[in-house]
Each structure stands twice: as C-alpha cells, then as structure tokens.
Amino acid sequence: MPRKRAKAEEKVVEKANETLPELEEELELEELESLEEEFEEEALDEAEPEEEAAEEAITELSEDEEALAADAAGEDVAEVEEEEEIEPLEEYEEEEIPERPRRETRQELLGRLMLRLLQEREKVHQALERVRDLNMQLRDAGPRPPEKLKEQYHKAIAELSRARREENFARAELMQVLSWRG
C-alpha cells in the first residue's frame, strides 16, 4: 500500500512539474497556490481508493481462511465464528505523520518584510526629529551649552545612525526577496 501511495504522489508531482513552468508565466501567485493545493488533494484522493481495496482484500482473505478451516474441520462457518472470532490481519499499522509547520508563502514573506521596512523608516523619522529638537536646543543655549545637552545630542545622533543601518538592512532584505525567482 505505501508503494501505491508513493506512486500516486510521484505521478501528481510529475504532472505538476510538467505543467507548472507553463502556468507560472500565465497565472498569478494566488492561482498557483490554489493549484498546488488541488494537486495535493488529488494525490490523497487517488490513494484512498487503493487503500480501501487493499483493506477489502485483507478482509476477503480472512473470510476465505475461515471457510477453509471450517471445511477442514467439517463444521459450518457460523460455528467457527461462534467459537472464536478471527481478527483481520493488520500487517500495516498507520504511521502518524507529524504535522509540518505551515510554510510562509512568498506573498506573506513580502508583506512581513515590507511591514518591517515601514517600521524601520518610522524609527528613522522619530530619531531624526529627536536630533533636530536637540540641535535647536543647542543653538538656543548659546556658545556654551550644558554638557548634559551635548551628551543627549550625541546619543540621539548614534540612535539615528543605528536606525538608518536597520532601515538599510530591512530594505536590502526586501530587495533580495523581490529579485529572487523560484
């Protein structure tokens, strides 16, 4: 049974691999995702009838074994069933497949990176406003501003530099994902 399921899945994967390059040019991202889900569902649907047929074959074999045993003993099948219940053969136990974490789609990834870039831009904007405010305070303080104000100004400039680096990193990561095809 596992071979039949694997063959069915391989057929679906081959079919998808043949048609996907052509479809990628014509269809939007959302349509591709829905087609991918349909192919996966088809593979599972094709595998289920084969599993049912195998289970029926096992049940038929156990009934045939009962009939042969009854003929050999010269008894009716009903009497054999009353004396002892023969459990069907269960050579294949169902394996529990651990659920894979849901993979982030390209659209979700782009959305997350764009949101991050916008947040980093907002931080840059806030840091820039802080530097401007402190600069105005330094100008108003005259030729000898207090040391505390100078320290705040230098910290604000360092924060602005850090925010700009983070924004540039977020932009670069977004551009990398946008230019990536596959």
Image: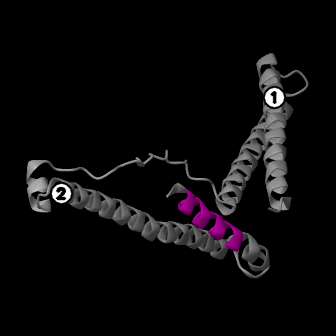
Q: Which mark is residue 33?
A: none
Task: Please state which amino acid type lies under the numbered disc 2.
Answer: Ala
Q: Classify residue 76 as left or right of residue 16.
A: left
In-front residue for pair 74/1? 74
**62 relative to 40, above or below:** above
Task: Please state which amino acid type lies under the numbered disc 1.
Answer: Tyr
Q: Nearer the viewer, mark 1 or mark 2?
A: 2
Q: Which mark is residue 70?
A: 2
Q: Position of residue 91 (x, y in %)?
A: 40, 47
**63 relative to 101, above or below:** below
| Residue drawn where x is 84% and y is 22% of the image | 145
**53 relative to 84, above or below:** below
Q: Position of residue 14 (x, y in %)?
A: 70, 69
Residue position for label 1: 153
Describe the element under mark 1 as helix, strand or loop. Answer: helix
In-front residue for pair 142/159? 159
In-front residue for pair 112/48? 48
| Residue drawn where x is 48% and y is 70% of the image | 45
Q: Classify residue 78 as left or right of residue 99.
A: left
Q: Which residues are magenta?
A: 3-15
Q: Which quadrant is home to the C terminus?
A: bottom right
- Residue 132 visible, this orientation: no
Residue, far top? 147
